[in-house]
Image (spheres, rainbow, N blue to C red):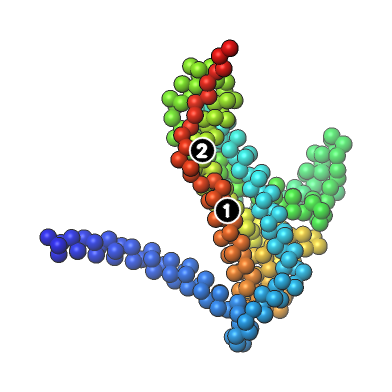
Amino acid sequence: MKRSKWKEYASWYLLLLIPLAGTVIFNVYPLIQTFIDSFQNMKNVFIGGVNYKILWEDEIFRQSVVNTLYMAVLGVCFNVPIAFIIANMLNNIPIAKNVYKVVFLLPMIMSMITVGTLFKYLMMPGEEGIFNFLLEYIGLGPYDWLNDPAMARESLIVMVVWKGMGYNIILFFAGLQAVPRELYEAAKIDGASEFKQWIYITIPSMKSSFTFVIITSTIAALKRFTDVYAISGETGNPAGALNTIMLYVYRNSFSTLNYKDLGRSSAASIVLFVIILIITLLNFKLTGSDNTETKVPKRRRG
């Protein structure tokens, strides 16, 4: 009996061996090697924390950190609420829900390079750009959008939110399907308005969905690279407004226009890893489950 049970457990562990090996080879080992490289120079000589000191004194890196955090906060603060509101609207329409879901998912099918090219055309400076052409009818503009250092980051966020919002809409929509209808029926009997039902039933019931969406959106925003590269290349222009930590790592690792420094880029990668780790832990702390029950709003009785 024990032998047969051992064989059964052995088969389970054997099935786990493949993904475990993939995790070690493609995640754990590169992280350890990057950490080691961050304390070495280009000749693989140990130099202590010199690379981290260089990063601290590098104005371009500091600007990259500020840009990364600013665009991450701005993107998540716009993406998540808008996606949640649209998902609620989809959940309440009686017909053609699948059609609207496909419409919102269409931008995700497009590559970021294609989207970047499209928005560079839409946001062309002067009257040539579609956005400026439309704003002219209401007496606004023209704006330089992606060519203006004061507007480039916000303009990029508009593009990123448009492309990635569909994914969060579907996640929220799936979460809304799991909210018990009995809660809404009980709230209606007690005379609760639709707005109160949304505040006291829908939002609290979606806590796990909010946790997942906020954490995954934040991690993706902090690792921002393809979108800024599609707009500005590896320069991060205009005036460095689109410099991010990932773009800084790329320039010091793979760039053909810049002096390569593997130690510095490894140190920047570790800094980004620590930032993501801290923010993810804070997200878990702030949005983690507290096992509270959803309260049904009741009508006040005079």
User: Eyeballing the image, is 226 above or below 157?
Assistant: below
Q: Residue at x 33, y 63 (%)?
A: 16
Would residue 178 be found to the left or right of residue 52 on screen? left
Residue occupied by mark 2: 206
Instruction: Find numbered disc 2 in the image and state the secondary structure of the residue it sits on.
Output: loop
Q: Which mark is residue 282?
A: 1
N-term-proximal mark, 2 vs 1: 2
Q: Residue at x 39, y 69 (%)?
A: 21
Residues at badges 2 and 1 in contact (C-beta under 8 Å)?
no
Q: Horizontal and vertical percent for residue 220?
A: 59, 55
Q: Horizontal and vertical percent for residue 209?
A: 51, 42
On-image quarter of the N terminus: bottom left
In the rendered image, the residue lying farthest to the right is: 139
Among the 4 quarters of the image, the one containing residue 141:
top right
Q: Is 267 or 288 nearer to us in this picture? A: 288
- The amino acid on which the numbered mark 1 sits, given as a three-letter code, is Leu
Q: CA distance from mark 2 to mark 1?
A: 19 Å
User: Eyeballing the image, is 29 above or below 177?
Assistant: below
Q: Is residue 116 visible?
A: no
User: Eyeballing the image, is 186 above or below 110?
Assistant: above
On-image quarter of the C terminus: top right
Q: Residues within 10 Å of mark 1 (few under 14, many from 20)?
A: few
Q: Is residue 195 visible?
A: yes
